[in-house]
Image (cartoon, rainbow, N blue to C red):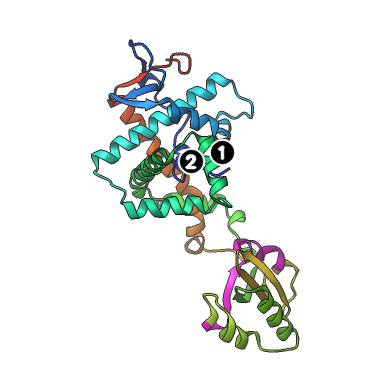
């Protein structure tokens, strides 16, 4: 099931138990259409229901609670907390005067629609989510603005040299370079053309020459040469295909995506070797940064909750 682009990214940054003391029950009668107020701003019940109703966000909530079948009240409490946190992000976006242009919004809507086979299935999804055109635009606009706040909060988070060295020292075996392979790749948009080129290669035609003449890939000018790459970093469907090739052999055609077919030639393999700290640093950062960034955003949200007036209008869903 398709989900809105930033909703999951924001939810992933938040811990289920953050700053519960900041949430207070409102003395006023609950409004059926509103589940909470954040600094006086209403939180529509529809947002809360979409969080619970979307299989992807619901699955993420279950994962955070550590159960595929959590207590329904715990699930609802966490879902409402996520929605409240999202509104804190939106209010921060307004304070920072972050805007989303019409052009950016149109591109986001178009990208979302492309995830569906046709307009009918897209419309069905919108109905399932309880969205009309206006609500969809406003939801995506809010998600993009809140996402920019998240990115800004996470931007200054770094992995220090000391942290990188400590991780490197304790994970040396995991940071081996693995097997490296050197490939030549020809990318074309037509399967019949790919078959014709494969037949030519199998008859002995130079892979480099054909790549320069016919490939539409990024390395056509280099004869399709990828240079030496860690085989573990290869995208699908290259991983399995390359594992079956012997040096000097050609494989394919492989369909990597709509209208793209690949021919792969294996130039050679070389065995695992230890990487230096400098070589391993990008991998270390990929492993450590997400948790560091999430922690920074969670800390910021905790402080915002302490400063904010948050009223829960549905006592049956969230306890003090």
Which range of residues does the magenta coloring cover?
A: 221-241
Q: Is residue 72 above or below residue 167?
A: above
Q: Marks 2 and 1: CB-CB under 8 Å?
A: yes
Residue 272, visible in the rendered structure: no
State the image quarter where residue 46 is shown.
top left
Apparent side of residue 70 relative to residue 6 in the rendered image (left or right):
right
Q: Considering the image in quadrants, where does the N terminus appear?
A: top right
Apparent side of residue 28 relative to residue 121 in the rendered image (left or right):
left
Residue 241, visible in the rendered structure: yes
Residue 298 lies, in percent from the top left, at 40, 35
Residue 106 lies, in percent from the top left, at 39, 53
Residue to which mark 1 is pinned: 56
Q: Considering the image in quadrants, where does the C terminus appear?
A: top left
Q: Is residue 219 above or below residue 140?
A: below
Q: Is residue 261 above or below residue 108?
A: below
Element marked by disc 1: helix
Residue 251 lies, in percent from the top left, at 72, 74
Residue at the (69%, 89%) spot, across then down: 205
Label at residue 8: 2
Element marked by disc 2: helix
């Amino acid at each position: 099931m398709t989900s809105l682009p930033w909703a999951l990214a924001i939810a992933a940054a938040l811990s289920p138990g953050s700053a519960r003391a900041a949430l207070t029950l409102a003395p006023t009668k609950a409004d059926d259409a509103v589940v909470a107020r954040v600094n006086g701003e209403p939180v529509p019940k529809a947002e809360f229901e979409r969080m619970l109703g979307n299989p992807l966000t619901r699955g993420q909530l279950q994962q955070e609670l550590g159960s595929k079948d959590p207590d329904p009240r715990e699930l609802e409490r966490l879902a409402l907390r996520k929605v409240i946190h999202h509104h804190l992000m939106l209010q921060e976006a307004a304070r920072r005067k972050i805007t989303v242009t019409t052009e950016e919004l149109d591109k986001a809507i178009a990208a979302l629609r492309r995830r569906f086979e046709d307009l009918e299935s897209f419309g069905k999804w919108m109905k399932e989510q309880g969205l009309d055109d206006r609500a969809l635009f406003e939801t995506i606009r809010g998600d993009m603005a809140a996402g920019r706040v998240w990115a800004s909060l996470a931007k200054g988070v770094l992995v220090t040299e000391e942290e990188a060295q400590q991780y490197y020292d304790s994970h040396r075996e995991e940071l081996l370079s693995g097997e490296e392979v050197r490939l030549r790749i020809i990318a074309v948009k037509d399967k019949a053309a790919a078959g014709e080129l494969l037949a030519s290669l199998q008859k002995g035609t130079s892979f480099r020459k054909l790549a320069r003449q016919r490939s539409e890939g990024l390395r056509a000018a280099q004869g399709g040469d990828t240079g030496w790459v860690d085989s573990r970093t290869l995208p699908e469907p290259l991983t399995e295909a390359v594992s079956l090739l012997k040096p000097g052999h050609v494989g394919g055609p492989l369909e990597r995506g709509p209208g793209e077919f690949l021919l792969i030639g294996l130039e050679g393999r070389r065995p695992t070797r230890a990487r230096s700290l400098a070589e391993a640093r990008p991998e270390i950062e990929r492993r450590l940064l997400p948790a560091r960034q999430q922690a920074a955003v969670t800390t910021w949200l905790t402080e915002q909750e302490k400063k904010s007036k948050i009223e829960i209008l549905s006592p049956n869903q969230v306890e003090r």
